[in-house]
Image (cartoon, rainbow, N blue to C red):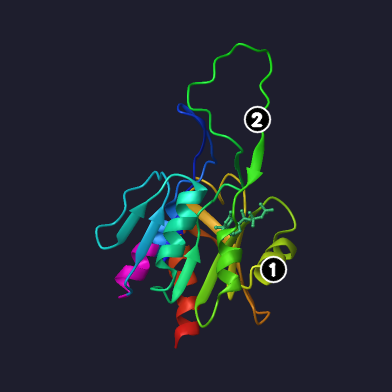
Amino acid sequence: MITAGPTREFLDPVRFLSNPSSGKMGIYIADEAAKMGADVLLIHGPVDVPIPERVRKISITSAEDMYNAVMKNYNWSDCVIMSSAVADFTPTEKIEAKIKKNEDELLVRLKRTKDILAELGKNKGKKILVGFALETENLEENARKKLHNKNLDIIVANLQSDRTGFRSDTNEVLILHRNGAAKKIPLTSKRKIAREILKIIAMEVI
Ligand code: CTP
């Protein structure tokens, strides 16, 4: 099971909070995994690139939708790769009618969404759990914390810049394993990065 893209957290019927994730990284991982012979289910938010025919897919909108879709399919999967940029906060209430600009200031109250990967980590069993960490500083340190706190096998850490992270066609990643091993993949296309990540995951399966 692979997740990709952003989620959208609606404030009212015409406005949402989201992030610039294009979904490319997760979609390329899904496509390459299917080419390698895996039975792939891709759960994705609103993405910028087409979903390959060879991949089964479920389209979702919000972090809550993604949580429900992932939980429903968790038993079926033996490896979960969470490359989606799930919103960490959602409005405490969704206004049913469009918010009108009556006031000079608008205060929006947000609440935390569920951390999907952390929930999966609590019920890991023999499954392989792979997370992503998008950081703007202290890449390795922050990613190692997430690897440990979410009980993951592997974390793929990347920095946000013009050529890496959200939207870009390229990426540069540091792949950290729970056993302490680390592998840096220098700047290259997201499709090549996808293959490298899958090679490392395949070693877990063998
Ligand atoms: N993730 C998740 N559920 C969330 C938020 C994040 O499953 N509600 C997953 C992401 O898909 C990713 C990993 O957790 O695989 C790390 O996401 P990231 O945004 O880098 O970090 P957070 O855990 O959200 O922590 P912070 O925002 O404080 O850096």
Quadrant of the rendering where the N terminus is positioned? bottom left
- Element assignment for label 1: helix
- Tell me which segment is drawn in magenta: 30-37
Q: Position of residue 72 (x, y in %)?
A: 41, 64
Question: Which residue is at a point 35% across and 64% down the rendered structure image?
Answer: 41
Magenta-drawn stretch, dominant element (helix, strand or loop) = helix
User: Which residue does the numbered mark 1 point to in the structure image?
Assistant: 149
* Quarter occupied by the C terminus: bottom left
CB of mark 2 within 8 Å of CB of mark 1? no
- Place residue 99 in its image quadrant: top right
Q: Earlier in the sequence, mark 2 or mark 1?
A: 2
In front: 110, or 146? 110
- CA distance separating discs 2 and 1: 29 Å
The residue indicated by pointer 2 is 108
Mark 1 crowdedness (10 Å alpha carbons): few <14, some 14-19, many ≥20: few
Residue 172 in the magenta stretch? The answer is no
Magenta-colored stretch includes residue 33: yes
Q: Secondary structure at mark 2?
A: loop
